[in-house]
Image (spheres, grey):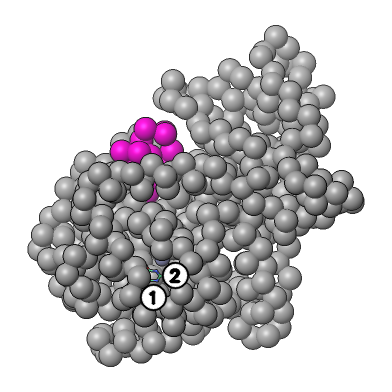
Amino acid sequence: MKAYRASILRFDEQHRAQYDEDGLLVVGPDAQGRQVVRAVGAYAQLAPDYAGLNIEHLPGRILAPGFVDMHIHYPQTDVIGAPADGLLPWLENYTFPHESRFSAPDYAAEVAQFFVAELLRNGVTTSLTFATSHPTSVDALFTEAQRQQMRLITGKVLQDRHSPDGVRDQTEQSLVDTEALIKRWHGVDRLGYAITPRFAPTSTAAQLRGAGELAAKYSDVWIQSHVAENLGEIAWARELFPDSRSYLATYNDFGLMRPRAVYAHCIHFDDDDRALMRDTGTVAAISPTSNLFLGSGFFDYAGADRVGFGYGLASDVGGGTSFSPFHTMLAAYYVGREGQTKTGLSLSPQQLWWQHTAGAAAALGLDGVVGNLQKGCEADFVVLNPQATPLLARKTSLANSLDELLFAMIVLGDDRLVERTVISQAG
Ligand code: GUN
Ligand code: ZN
């Protein structure tokens, strides 16, 4: 067992932050030998029970749950910042040509190593990640995540039409490959598989049907895709699947909406779409830096809460512009202020932080497993240094409340704030 003395941030079941200014975090192995939180709370209260334990004292530092990124593309690490006239030209001119390079295992392995290191450097300890349509790209990322003992979910992209040579796959083979990858990787160590149709316009009905059949057969595997991001994309999807009630409903018609199904963007919804998300237990990966960069629109938080479906935050690199959860939380704040209805929500710092940790974990079906520092959670956490830059030091020292402290870090923070990322180790 090992203990850390520092300020500690975690979340209760009402999504409120709990903060111990002088706290103690005790980690030790669970029955499977993995490091989990064994005790957490005020130092003065817990210390007598843990006398004699090796305690690392981190004065002035804040321990917080490792961040959970609900949607990111590892093959788009080098696509960040590609200028284009919105989503569809961005895919055609930059993203598809670049992703074709991932058929080469050595290239995929090099990018996977950089990608995982960059996530960890930014304090992200769990991610749901797109690979490319090449099975080798999936093997490369799982191999690296396993080496780092990181909790990571990914899958081979399914795209058997409206895609150029080099990324387009073949219907039958794509489903055979998907099932083989599920058997090879799902549930191994901390890894999970996600059935990954890119989005409805680049899959035939046969491919979506096959994906839905696999989703029914392997019910604890995740599903990930994109929906209702951009008006041109929506018009295209409606043209290709005119029998479905809406773009979102297309996925439901093929059996691709259920708990553990995660759709990026979910911007241009009506209330029937929102109710379909709620009723099927499907969740949204809100991707604010991407939506602002590609000019896609603004996620409607008020609409989501009114109808009541689950969501959390995501970087969506490389449509998104940053690996940093602080940049993503700030962009989410801007999105809330702008809104779709112009009512201008002010998402609280605690709410923003929750959406990128415990809230994102809950949306992925991993509540109580990651994204929090409550007893029993896997011991993935970040050590934050609020003095990391002169401006951060100045601003955080003026904070009169937890909200002011958290907001100063959200607005001014980036990778420099993350002094260390600790990953739960297997015994
Ligand atoms: N829709 C289909 N593919 C993509 C992608 O790679 N990025 C984004 N942002 N949207 C998509
Ligand atoms: Zn995406």
| Residue 145, magenta (yes or no) | yes
Q: Quadrant of the N terminus?
A: top right
Q: In the picture provided, is 175 more to the left or to the right than 396?
A: left
Q: CA distance from mark 1 to mark 2?
A: 7 Å
Rendered image: mark on residue 90: 1
Q: Nearer the viewer, mark 1 or mark 2?
A: 2
Q: In the picture provided, is 361 more to the left or to the right than 202?
A: right
Circles 1 and 2, Cβ within 8 Å, touching? The answer is yes
- The magenta span reads 142-153
Q: Position of residue 78 (x, y in %)?
A: 41, 58
Q: Nearer the viewer, residue 267 or 115?
A: 115
Q: Nearer the viewer, residue 141 or 23?
A: 141
Of helix, strand and loop, which one carries label 2? loop
Residue 328 in view here? yes
Q: Is residue 61 above or below residue 133?
A: above
Q: Is mark 1 within 8 Å of ligand 1?
A: yes
**In the image, ligand 2 is in what quadrant?**
bottom left
Q: Position of residue 50 (x, y in %)?
A: 70, 16
Q: In the picture provided, is 237 more to the left or to the right than 364?
A: left
Number of numbered discs = 2
Rendered image: mark on residue 82: 2
